[in-house]
Structure formats: structure tokens, C-alpha cells
Amino acid sequence: MVKFGLLAKVVAKPGKEQEAENFLKSALSLAQAEKGTIQWFAFKIDQSTFGIFDTFETEDARQAHLSGEIAKALMAKAPDLFSQTPEINQIDILASK
């Protein structure tokens, strides 16, 4: 059962919206390689605002994800693509279907 999650929000710099969207789409293969990541979603809120939502069964899996390849790539690309530091929130899943 998933009990743990992450909810991240990023805002693309003006003119970098498509590049930010492409970057998030390209991270899917990295998420698929993570055994502890149960679900992983990249989504678009508006023209320049994007998010990532992922779920985990254990705290260890969530922490592994936070120090994994997606997080490293996100932080490496952040100064070029995003107008502010990515906002990453650790959340507890109360109910799911």
C-alpha cells in the first residue's frame, strides 16, 4: 500500500516552457527504472507551471528517490530551466484507489 509521496512544482523561465516540458517527459525512463517508485506522474498546470507527483510504499523508497537520478537531473537543470528553485513537498498518502 502506498503511504508516502512527493509533490513537486516547478515554474519554467520565460521562453523555456517547451524545454521544461520535454525535460519532464524524458524523466519517465528514469522513474521506470526505480523499483521503489510505485507511481510517477509529470503534469502541466498552466503554460509555465509543471509538477511531479510520485508515490512510495516505504520512507526508504521515498528517500532513495530524493537522492536518485531524477532529483539529480532536476536540480542540475533548475538554474537553466526554472525561474525559482523547485518546490518539493514530502506528503503522506491518507487514502488511494
Image (spheres, rainbow, N blue to C red):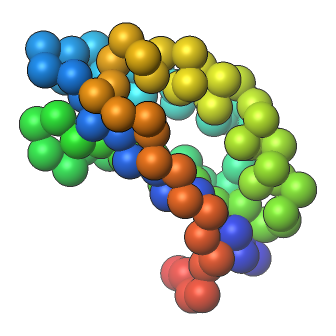
Q: Quadrant of the N terminus?
A: bottom right
Looking at the image, residue 66 sits to the left or right of residue 74; the answer is right
Image position of 88 with respect to 10: above or below: below
Question: Residue 78, position in %: x, y?
Answer: 45, 22
Image position of 7 with respect to 41: above or below: below
Question: Count of labels shown?
Answer: 0
Residue 29 visible, this orientation:
no
Looking at the image, residue 67 sits to the left or right of residue 23; the answer is right
Write the residue at 28% across / 28% down. 83
Depth check, front residue: 42 or 83: 83
Depth check, front residue: 87 or 53: 87
Q: Please, which residue is most extreme toward the bottom here? A: 95
Write the residue at 72% across / 61% down. 56
Write the residue at 83% across / 63% down. 59
Residue 72 visible, this orientation:
yes
Question: Residue 28, position in %: x, y?
Answer: 53, 30
Depth check, front residue: 94 or 97: 94
Write the residue at 45% across / 48% down. 87
Q: Please, which residue is most extreme toward the right here? A: 60
Image position of 73 with respect to 1: above or below: above
Question: Residue 54, position in %: x, y?
Answer: 57, 54
Looking at the image, residue 71 sits to the left or right of residue 43; the answer is right
Q: Residue 16: name its quadrant.
A: top left
Question: Residue 75, position in %: x, y?
Answer: 56, 25
Q: Residue 25: name its quadrant.
A: top left
